[in-house]
Image (spheres, grey):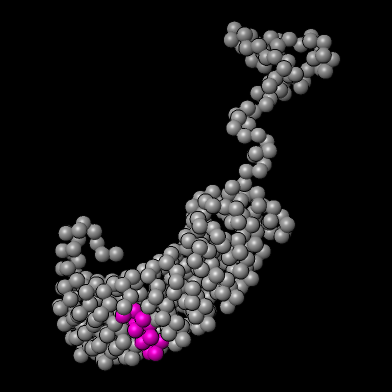
């Protein structure tokens, strides 16, 4: 078509008007006069050509094309222009998909505001991962305003964003009944304090949607442990809680363990590197004797000595649900190691117990590993799947 139009344009205007340039001659000139087929392909005058793209407009009018912004792309581009922000090509791409993975883009407050404009209308995205974007409290508030009431988003990752107390309070509002359908929330590495955990726990107590909460690598201390312990006594939806690399210490971990005693929903719990010591470990040992829901427990790097190891071993041996325990980087010594071996032998449902660097005898750990590996192999044969 382009060749034809270029050829027609080279014809003098008065020739076109007088009709002296025949379509047959044009065909011969373009084709070089080779073959009968070229001479038969008559080209109509340019004024008779139909340049209207019916396929593009077949199902929608021009007005509808301009107004149809179900993905929020137009809103995003307009907001970027108004805020003098360079649009992210990846953001435009992900607006049409169910998962938006925009970690480490450094979008900042203005970039988030632009994206929030799109998210107000978008109902396609279900996974929203915005970790490490220098958002801050104000951006977190803007995001919550944009997605509040959006039942499409089920996973939200705001890790490494320094959302602060104001941002945390905004997130708490998002977790209120009917405010959202978020099931997976990641707030790790945000320097959250006890008051932030308290604000979240107040709404999570009555939240039945949330399934996974990650508040690891923050500054949560004893009061946070107490708040989370109280929350899990009432919450019936949570299945996983990640609290590793905080500082809840003995009293905070004790309060958490007491709250978990009657909880049957939480299956995975990570409290590694919290300084629980023997006080917290003893409380966890007592909890494991009565808890019937916990499947996986991580408590590595907690300064647990012989006393705590003995209490934990007693609970592990009696647990009806526990399948995997991670206790690396503690100080069990020989006595604690032998107690763990006895627990493994007693609890036939246990398929994994890791305790590297616990000052326990290598022979004891080797005996445990052999027993547990045999159970894993047997489980794989019976179920066809390995323990994940």
Residue at image position (19%, 86%) is 339
Query: What kind of secondary structure does the magenta stretch mostly adopt?
Result: helix
Quadrant occupied by the C terminus: bottom left
Which residues lie in the magenta part? 250-261
Quadrant occupied by the N terminus: top right
| Closer to the camera in the image, 373 or 24 | 373
Q: Is residue 58 above or below residue 380?
A: above
Residue at image position (41%, 81%) is 230
Residue at image position (64%, 57%) is 117
Residue 248 seen in the current view: no
Is residue 258 found inside the magenta-colored segment of the image?
yes
Q: Is residue 238 above or below residue 100?
A: below
Q: How many marks?
A: 0
- Farthest residue toward the top? 36
Is residue 377 found inside the magenta-colored segment of the image?
no
Tell me if 295 is positioned left or right of 188 in this view: left
């Amino acid at each position: 078509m382009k060749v034809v139009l270029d050829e027609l344009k080279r014809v003098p205007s008065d020739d076109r008007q007088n009709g002296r340039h025949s379509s047959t001659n044009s065909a011969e000139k373009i084709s070089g006069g080779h073959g009968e087929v070229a001479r038969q392909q008559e080209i109509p005058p340019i004024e008779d050509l139909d340049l209207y793209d019916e396929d593009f407009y077949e199902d929608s009018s021009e007005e509808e094309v301009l107004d149809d912004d179900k993905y929020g792309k137009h809103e995003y581009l307009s907001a970027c222009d108004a805020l003098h922000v360079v649009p992210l090509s990846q953001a435009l791409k992900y607006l049409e998909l169910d998962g938006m993975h925009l970690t480490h883009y450094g979008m900042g407050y203005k970039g988030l505001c632009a994206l929030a404009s799109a998210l107000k209308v978008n109902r396609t995205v279900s996974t929203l991962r915005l970790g490490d974007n220098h958002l801050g409290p104000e951006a977190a508030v803007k995001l919550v305003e944009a997605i509040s009431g959006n039942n499409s988003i089920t996973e939200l990752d705001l890790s490494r964003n320094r959302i602060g107390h104001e941002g945390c309070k905004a997130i708490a509002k998002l977790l209120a009944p009917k405010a959202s359908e978020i099931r997976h929330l990641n707030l790790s590495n945000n320097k959250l304090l006890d008051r932030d955990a308290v604000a979240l726990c107040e709404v999570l107590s009555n939240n039945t949607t949330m399934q996974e909460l990650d508040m690891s690598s923050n500054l949560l201390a004893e009061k946070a442990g107490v708040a989370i312990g109280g929350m899990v006594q009432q919450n019936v939806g949570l299945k996983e809680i990640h609290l590793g690399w905080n500082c809840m210490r003995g009293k905070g971990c004790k309060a958490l363990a007491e709250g978990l005693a009657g909880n049957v929903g939480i299956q995975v719990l990570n409290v590694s590197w919290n300084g629980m010591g023997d006080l917290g470990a003893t409380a966890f040992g007592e909890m494991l004797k009565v808890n019937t829901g916990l499947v996986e427990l991580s408590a590595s790097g907690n300064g647990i000595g012989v006393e705590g190891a003995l209490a934990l071993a007693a609970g592990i041996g009696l647990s009806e649900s526990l399948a995997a325990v991670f206790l690396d980087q503690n100080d069990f010594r020989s006595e604690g190691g032998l107690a763990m071996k006895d627990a493994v032998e007693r609890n036939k449902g246990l398929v994994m117990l890791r305790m590297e660097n616990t000052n326990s005898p290598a022979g004891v750990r080797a005996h445990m590993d052999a027993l547990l590996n045999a159970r894993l192999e047997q489980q794989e044969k019976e179920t066809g799947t390995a323990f994940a």
